Amino acid sequence: MFSSIFLFLLLNISILMVRFTHTRCFWRMKQNENKEGDLGTGCVFPIRLVPFPVEEEYFSYILNTQTPTKNYQFALALAFSINEVNKNADLLPNMSLVFDIFEDSCMSTPKLKRLMHLSETNRHRISPNYVCDDEITCSVLLTGPKWKTSWNIRTIMELYIPQQILQLTYGPFHPMLSDSDQFPYLYQMAPKDTSLALAMVSIIIHFLWNWVGLAISDDDQGIQFLSYLRTEMEKNTACLAFVNMIPVNMQLYMSRAEVYYNQIMTSSANVVIIYGDTDSTLAVSFRMWESRGIQRIWVTTSQWDVTTSKRDFTLDSFHGTFAFAQHHSEISGFKNFLQTLNPLKYSDTYLAGLEWMHFNCKAMASKTVKNFVSNATLEWLKEQTFDMAFSDNSYNIYNAVYAVAYALPKLLLQRVDNPTNGKGPISLCLKMYSVLKKTLFTNPVGDTVNMNQKKKCQAEYDIFYIWNLPYDLELKWKIGKFSPHFQQGQQLHLSEDMLEWTTGGRQMPVSVCSADCGPGFRKFWQQGMPPCCFDCSPCPENEISNDTNLDQCVKCPEDQYANPEHNQCIQRAVVFLGYEEPLGMALAIMSLCFSVFTAIVLGVFVKHHATPIVKANNCTLSYILLISLIFCFLCSLLFIGHPNSVTCILQQITFGVVFTVAVSSVLAKTITVVLAFKLTIPERKMKYILVSGTPNYIIPICTLIQMILCAIWLGVAPPSIDIDAHSEHGRIIIVCNKGSVIAFYCVLGYHGSLALGTFTLAFLARKLPDTFNEAKYLTFSMLLFCTVWVTFLPVYHSTKGKVMVTVEIFSILASSAGLLGCIFIPKCYVILLRPERNSFKNLRKKTSS
């Protein structure tokens, strides 16, 4: 058992260590100098070609004797890149690239003229036998990372040495430098940030944020980014809680600084996007916000990782910086190269103060967040460090050096093939620029570099998260990647393991305008509110929402209904008057019992057909009436059970026809009584009418009329199944729809007219001689019949569902039982219990008396 548990834990730790192996982790020392003093500072590095090999001692000499005071990491990256190019004999055989740095290489604009002069002097000092005094060459300058530095240098060069300098910038891409007409000899190594807005919106949507703030510089670059960002946010239903457009002018900014501070403090947005130059008033504003204790999740670019707060990380909150950096493969050997030049100077601690340092991610696999933060001492990190990282700007320097190395041999070959052409700085720089723009190569780390700006692919981004740790340390690791080349929905890839480790299992902070509308509610927008701000409204009756933030509730199908929480449709119980339930069973038993009893009465009448009481009242009509009553009782069974199209039609047609036969039989018996005792016509004719059975024709005639009415009913609007899902909550009542209500009441009215006519005749004949007269029984039976059906109408209309069906069945049984009981029970009493009264002898005595 113990061994199984041990193997399970070992397997999980191994899996976690494998996942950490593919993660890039970095640390560095926090910057101690005041970055506000760097506003407007950039670096310029001239690059030249010499016709002899250059050893590593040259780089040690130039880096140790001529050290810029600012941005020294760029000079180190340049030295490493040029040394790697010079070691590649296939690129520049028998030649080497060199560069110059000075104390004021990272300078302000007024010092540019002095730099150019020193550069020319130094070029003659290093290579006196290679460059002729009368030959003017095309120099290459690397400028950056601030775009204003590149702009100012280009402007000054246009005044003093126009068209003699080819300028490559290694800072972030800036639209102000992309005008080829204004700057024909300037090339930006960094790709455009056209997909940056989409990348930022993708991570916002991933964490279910939809309410974020934005702080940008109030310039063309900031306005352009705002346009891109709003477009992507509108596509993904995300909103800007506020937009701080920081003025470029320092005095104007200082007059409004409190307004921007209050705006971000009072906003409910926990996520703020920062975009702009790190040498602008925006950077001043950002440092001020963090120094005053504003805790937000910052989403920005890699250039801003140098401006992160000096405040220590706290485990109680998850507030840090998501930085988007230009994706590139890792360049190895940087730290080893520098420590080979000067191991004492370029220690890990010194280099960590300049640039991010790679350390072993697997060392974090067995640590929790709390343990890692408490144990992340400087010595521990130095033990795990294996290389020095290349920032975006340093990587642009790396590619710029290789671009020059690939372009120079092609340029020299053109000059050899056409020695008379290409003389003079204008022609040479034009050719150099033309060759450079067409250069396409794969650098040593495997990344393809296309110098044609029009054919450059959109930039891919690595996503990093930055922590502020105790002991003046900062931690950064890669948590994902964004690639615009994949289809939508697959562009963002985040490491869930690293995110879980980062948060320590805590939930990411929420940044939404309105709380989610949970299941059972729908979003409701008020006029003037942003799309991300809404109220939650409960779903209407019989509608549900089973997800969060749905715009509309979904109506449940007819056979389902919404539960009280309105988040699930429940199957409705199908309700009908069935044989299984007590009411249906009782009515069915009553119907069968009455049918059997009627059949017994019929048997009694058939058995005693020769007796006076049976013969005196037209035994044929009695038989027809009894048989029709049997069917009247049985037809009520059609109303019980699951309705279908056939039973719905048979219910009404059978009811209409058999009741017409029954009532018309009673009418015929009544007419027979009236003819026997009331007619004053001659005796022979009366006898002929009675003997010939003329009253018996009343039954088929009346039945035919009812059948015609039923046929019209079936032709116009026959009865059908009716599903009633609204009368009772949670139930579907299945009943038979009458189809044509007019036809139904015509059938019922026809019954009523026959019953009323029968009642009238029977009432007139009620005082005829008692021996042969059943008029009293007929009168009472019709009175009961009419009472039942008159009462039926209001009760029928006031009920629904199976109660309504029960009322109709009860009316059928009651009216049929009334006819049976009033007409035949007295006769059965005489036949079975008083047989002496049912003899011709007794009848003669009564007649004579």
Image (tube, helix red, strand yellow):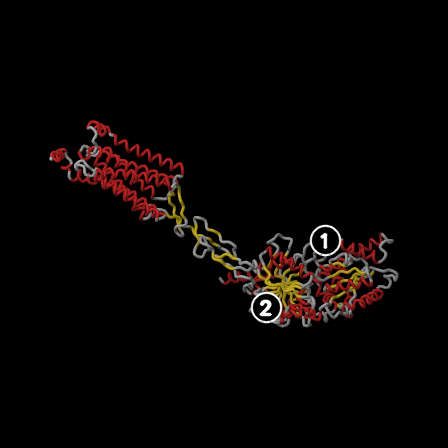
| Viewer can see residue 61 | no
Say whether residue 666 is left or right of residue 357: left
- Disc 1 on helix, strand or loop? helix
Name the spot of residue 531 as percent of width and height, x first. 56, 58
How many other residues sit within 10 Å of disc 2, few (<14), some (14-19) or many (≥20)?
A: some
- Looking at the image, the residue that sits furthest to the front is 680
Depicted 799 relative to depicted 146: above or below: above
User: Disc 1 to disc 2, how far (Cα)?
Assistant: 42 Å
- In the figure, residue 756 lies in which quadrant? top left
Give the class, few, some or many, for how many residues have Cα within 10 Å of label 1's Cα (few <14, many ≥20). Answer: few
On the image, numbered disc 2 is attached to which residue?
Answer: 265
Amino acid at dot 1: Lys
| Residue at x 39%, y 50% (from the top left corner) | 727
* Left/right of residue 417 with respect to residue 88 in the rendered view: right
Task: Out of 128 and 249, give the one closest to the viewer.
Answer: 249
Sequence-wise, which precedes: disc 1 or disc 2?
Answer: 2
Indicate the position of residue 209 as horizontal and vertical percent values.
Answer: 57, 60
Q: How many marks?
A: 2
Quadrant occupied by the C terminus: top left
488 or 837, which is in the foreground? 837
Displayed quadrant of residue 527:
bottom right
Q: Given the image, on which type of amino acid does mark 2 rest?
A: Met
Q: Is residue 277 visible?
A: yes
Residue 56 numbered mark, or none:
none
Residue, disc 1: 454
Question: Would residue 293 be found to the left or right of residue 39 on screen?
Answer: left
Residue 6 x, y percent position in the rendering: 52, 62
Residue 493 % position (x, y):
60, 57
Residue depicted at 82% across the width and 60% down the height: 162
